[in-house]
Amino acid sequence: MRHSKNLWMLITIVTGSLFILAACSKDTTLGKENLNENNNSDSDKEKVTIQVAFPLNEEYFDGRFGEVDEKLDHIDLEHVPYDGSIESLEELFAEKQFPDIIIGDYPPIRELGIEHPLDDLVEKHDFNLDSLDPSLLSYMRSLGENGEIVGFPDGGSFYALYYNKNVFDKLGKDYPDLDKPMTWNELMNLAKDMTKEVDGVQYIGLHGGPAGALAEFAAPLTDADTGDVLVEKNPQFKKYFELLNSYYSIPGIDNFDSEDDPFAEEETAAMFISSNNYFAWGFGNPEPEEVEHIEMAPVPVWEDQPETTPAQNAWVMAIPDYSEHKDEAFEVLTTYLEPDIQIEMAKTMMLQTPLADNEVLEHYGSEVPSYENKNIDAYFFGEAAKYEEKQSNWDQYVDLEKAEERLREEKTDIVTILRELAEESEGKIKSKMKSQ
């Protein structure tokens, strides 16, 4: 399967996603002791149907929630298909269908005014928030107006630096450290050393650029309240663009227009940053022998934050305010998050667990043949960056990808690029504000 030339950019600006810190976190339990207020057994409860709006097909829904449905005798789960858009939800409502749980991106829920923060249910049922990955929990809070928990994360994002041992051997380079990440500058230096022609073959050190570097800052593009554009004011953006420029400045490395994937197909690229699903979509669910020459190391880090990996995001599992079965819906979500259920999904990589639970992570990929004897611990290095600011609706008016393309194609200086990006974005935002 071929890559889009902008895949790494999409990954970088978190469209799904960035990384997990759970390997370093303590084991926790979910704290559901008070979920049944009257301590009644399931058989004593009135049977209810909980409808779940889920953007994927029935088979995938069953893979995620089948065990939950079996475990809760007093609850029947019903999959409600929708495409994740606000229009799709509006169509459901027009048909008098009102799901008790909505899973997907959060903006449609907020725009329709049907949000119901989970804070009261968390307190009522004594749910242990420490069981969740801190970066994902910070993301859930960043979606709220005042730091409330808008929902639970349905999963996470695991990423690594993949490298081709055959290319390293051909070019006479030592393999990356399996336990300690390179800094981004070290990665650029290695990529430069490995971008050369040997025996008539052009090799490149790193395909796709420094994916994940910007996400390690978890920096908002705009102020959520005022719409002020921050790309010039926050020095982290200049730092990121300088790194990006160092990548584009390596002679011969810019291979975005290649017809074939230089890492998975041509084997002319030494390294590539991607998610745990890379074996599936990059190599087509390979047999172990087909990827013997591919290994994973931790994703690179910034020198001044050596254990901070890219921030995570996820679909939100939300309970809308109109639901008449909020307690039961909450029980569905907390059951979904129980370690035994998460372990079964972790084994097959059905889900990148949102739990900060080492016991779950120990099983990750254990039933996926292509991951046999691979350095899966690379996914779990460090701590993912946390979102300190509220997610801004104005970020969508900042075309960061276009600015990155300008740097690549026009070689314009960084100060000018960021200034013009800020000016263009401010114009769009002011125009939108006037129209509201």
Image: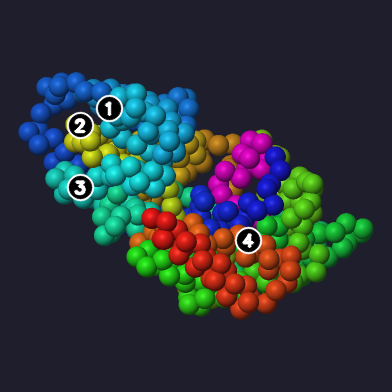
Q: Are marks 2 and 4 in contact (CB under 8 Å)?
A: no
Amino acid type indicated by mark 2: His
| Residue located 74% across and 65% down the image | 409
* Tag 4: amino acid: Lys
Give neighbour class at mark 1: few <14, some 14-19, many 20+ (Cα, 10 Å). Answer: many
Upstream in the sequence, badge 4 or badge 3? 3
- The image shows residue 329, relative to residue 149, as above or below, that is above
- Rendered view: 389 above or below 133: below
* Residue at mark 1 to residue at mark 2: CA–CA distance: 8 Å
Q: Disc 2 versus disc 3: distance between alpha carbons?
A: 15 Å
Task: State whether residue 290 appears in this view.
Answer: yes
Find disc 1 in the rendering and name its residue: 50
Instruction: Determine which of the numbered discs, if any, sits on residue 325 in the image.
Output: 2
Residue 102 coordinates in the image, percent (x, y):
34, 36
Q: Identify the residue under disc 4.
A: 402
Specify the farthest residue to the front: 435
- How many numbered discs sit on the rendered protein? 4
Residues under numbered marks 4 and 3 in contact, where contact means CB atoms less than 8 Å apart: no
Quadrant location, the N terminus: top right
Q: Residue 122 — which label?
A: 3
Instruction: Give the residues drawn in magenta, as a range.
Output: 272-286
Q: Residues within 10 Å of mark 4 (few under 14, many from 20)?
A: few
Q: Secondary structure at mark 1?
A: strand
Element on which disc 3 rests:
helix
> Which label lies toward us, 2 or 4?
4
Q: From this viewpoint, which residue is outermost toward the right?
A: 200
Q: Earlier in the sequence, mark 1 or mark 4?
A: 1
**Amino acid type of disc 1?**
Ile
- Verify whether residue 383 appears in magenta: no
